[in-house]
Amino acid sequence: MFNIALICTCFNRVKITRKSLNTITKALKNTKKINKFHFFILDDNSKDQTNKFLTNFKNTSVLKSKGNLYWARGMRVCFSYFYNDIIKYDILIPFNDDVILKKNNLNHLIDKYELLLKKKKLFLLSVPCKFNNKIIYGGQKFKYNSFLPIFKIVKPFKNKLLKIDVINMNFALIPMSIISKYKFLDNYFKHALADFAFSLKLRKFKIYSYLYSKPIIECRPNLRQSKKLEKIDLKPKEKFYKNYFMIYYYLWPVRTFFKKYFYETNKITKK
């Protein structure tokens, strides 16, 4: 039997958050090998009814921040604040508050988690998310293209756990023994890439990521404020590449020069 801690950040979308927590709660209650579960949630200074809903939701601890933490910083602040409580559980599930579980229980998922636990002991297990029958989150593999690491979404394969390079933390299962030893997200991230970095950090210790075989979650791709978020992530992105893709990082000025050179040359030729 497993005890589960779930962690997420919320901001100003109480209807979506309510639906997400309700579907997750229903599924967890109906899962045989789950003893108890608890939500640890950061409300990033919502102005709607999010905080009121969360503070009255069962099995939930809420931390309200002053705003502008975004995803990675919000998750890290929440994790640090509730660390002593979180660490008492067996499994940590980071999730986004816009995911909708499409199953009434997670029996099959927990069975696969238990199987991995016996074989690998330490691992990350991500659950694929779909929107309009297309896989949008879950896990990715990367390859080098002219020294540029290209990440590609991996589609789940029926009845098989796939080994992947990095996970998305829209809904992922992490053994608490990993958390107690390697902590959680790196502190230089503000919004994106922190889950990728966590996967790559663990790979250095031969702890690998896997993708669950069923897309049992639905969620919309987050396309809002993309330009603003890109600006927020510029410096963290640079450090991410320096830490995990050093060749690309140091060749970046050279690649930029040639890209600009060929662009200008093409312009002149076309004229």
Image (cartoon, helix red, strand yellow):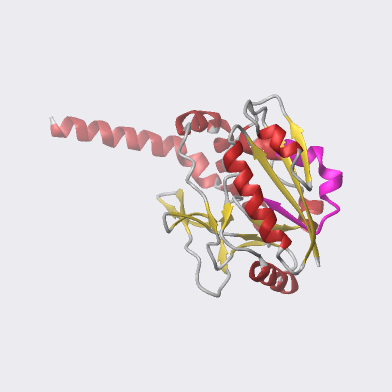
Front residue (pair 55, 197): 55
Query: In the rendered image, is residue 158 in sight?
Result: yes
Is 72 in front, or is 128? Answer: 128
Q: Is residue 227 above or below residue 142?
A: above
Q: Is residue 130 above or below residue 82?
A: below
Residue depicted at x 68% and y 43%: 8
- Magenta part of the protein: which range? 76-96
Q: Name the residue: 73% across, 63% down.
A: 122
Residue 198 appears anywhere in the view? no
Q: Is residue 202 magenta?
A: no
As drawn, is 82 to the left or to the right of 158? right
Residue 80, how many percent across, how many down? 79, 39
Position of 66 with respect to 271 (left or right) is right
Instruction: Indicate the quadrant containing the N terminus: top left, top right, bottom left or bottom right.
Output: bottom right
Residue 79 in magenta stretch: yes
The residue at 34%/37% (across/down) is 258
**What residue is rendered at 14% in x and 34% in y?**
270
From this view, report whether residue 227 is shown above or below residue 163: above
Q: Quadrant of residue 243?
A: top right
Residue 5 x %, y %: 76, 52
Query: x%, y% of residue 271?
Result: 13, 29
